[in-house]
Image: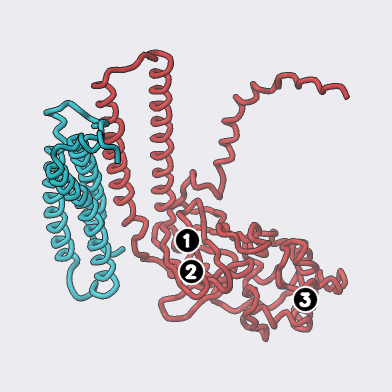
Chain colours: A cyan, B red
Amino acid sequence: MDRSDHDRQPHPREDEHEFAEERESLWRITLGPTIWAFHFAISYAAVSVYCFRFERMFEMGWLRAGLIAMTLAMLVAIAWIGWRAFLRWDVRGTGEFSNPEGSAEDRHQFLGHAGFLLALVSFIGVVYDTLPLILLGSCR
Amino acid sequence: MTPTPRPARPRYRHALWLAPLLLAACEGRQSALVPAGEDARILGDLFWVMLIGAVLLWIGMNGLFYWATRRSPAPHSQTLANWLVIIGGILFPTVTLGALLVYGLSIMPDLRATGDGPVIRVTGEQWWWRVEYERADGTTVTTANEIRLPAGVRSTFLLDSKKVIHSFWVPSLGGKMDMFPGRVTEMTLGPERPGIYRGQCAEFCGESHAWMAFEAEVMEPEDFDAWLEAEAADAMPPEGDLAQRGAALFLAQGCGACHAVRGTPAVGRVGPDLTHVGSRHSLAAGRLGTSAEDFVRWVANPGAWKPGAEMPAYAHLSDAQLAAIAAYLEGLE
């Protein structure tokens, strides 16, 4: 390794710390889409199983109410994740949209940006998933 | 070799203005754009909404291209670009797709409404349609290649197939539904306007797929009831010498091994039921008419009209014999 390069790293501990933080937010940006995926799988599986097996046993209204309550909780969670990501992006503070530098701070803000957009897409996805539940009240 | 001269500019460019005349082809008894039933009307509306929406979007996008490349080609401000992405890239598609989703979901229950009219079992064969009306008393009325429906009620179709996948479609009355061997699919249609429409197999099913059509007649309910009553009855005995000779020939030639003519010894189930074939609007699943000449043509050489048809040719029969069989079949009303 080039000696001069080596000399340019005065705070190795700080880098490590930042890296750990970044790794954590890398996980965090997947949270929105993960909730969306679970919402999709749970909603469709529940309605399929209900229509296949339990249609005659109880009214669909209960299932719908339960799934819509789950949807609301998931939307709140996604909104919270999105808000946290938006704060990390800090576009209002820096005025910087695309964070092209590649510095630790830029990466941090970029992950916030990506997390925010993924949360937005997930929010819309969950709303779209739920429309059939609201508009179609039966198994037909 | 001399270079070929460049062709002159076509002079018939102005003929393009006549292209809208092609839209006249959208008329007719097999057009999804001229609905004769509830379902076709819903689907027709869906088509127009999508078409008009797509045209507006196309004009809007091309307007933007024009604006960005011709009217205002200089770089735009960051703020404008950001808002363009936020409104044009996120807000507009989200709202538009959401609205289309709501619209699409709102019409689904209508298209899947349960039937309150007759239950008709249709089985796709290569290349014709076996049609069985299930009556309230538990009996079945078998016919083929023609479907009659009462106007104003929803009929239920139980669709099945013998060997390959077919698709049941009467564009004037509604959407299509695939027919799978060994699996019954269900659809309902609510015809509104009496008339004779045309159905067509809409899934490639072999060499005569294109000739696998049928007539769908929508009738006033009381006419339908009377027709079904008549259809349930046995075949009329042949009238006149020629038809009587034809009936004897029909049995002697073994036609009854494949075809049923109820009330006679012919009870085959391989081919279409011919009990009332003379009263149908078409022969061989929409391939020919039902005149005596059409029957002669068909019986003499079915493969000429429907390549791959299982029915053998009866070209060895004399003209007189063919005429007798045709007279018999034509009289089966």
At 39% from the left and 60% from the top, the residue drawn is B153
Q: Earlier in the sequence, mark 2 or mark 3?
A: 2
Residue nearest the viewer, comparing A9 with B117: A9
How far apart in space, not on screen, are marks 2 and 3 (Cα)?
34 Å
Tell me, yes or no, whether dots 2 and 1 are on the same chain.
Answer: yes
Crowding at mark 2 (Cα within 10 Å: few <14, some 14-19, many 20+) = many
What kind of element bears circle 1? strand
Query: In the picture, residue B215 is in which quadrant?
Result: bottom right
Percent coordinates x, y for residue B250 in the rendering: 75, 79
- Residue tagged 3: B246
Image height of B229 relative to A108, above or below: below
Q: Identity of the amino acid at label 2?
A: Leu
At 11% from the left and 49% from the top, the residue drawn is A76
Left or right: B242 in relation to B306? right
Residue nearest the viewer, comparing A120 with A130: A120
- Residue tagged 2: B159
Percent coordinates x, y for residue A99 in the rendering: 23, 32
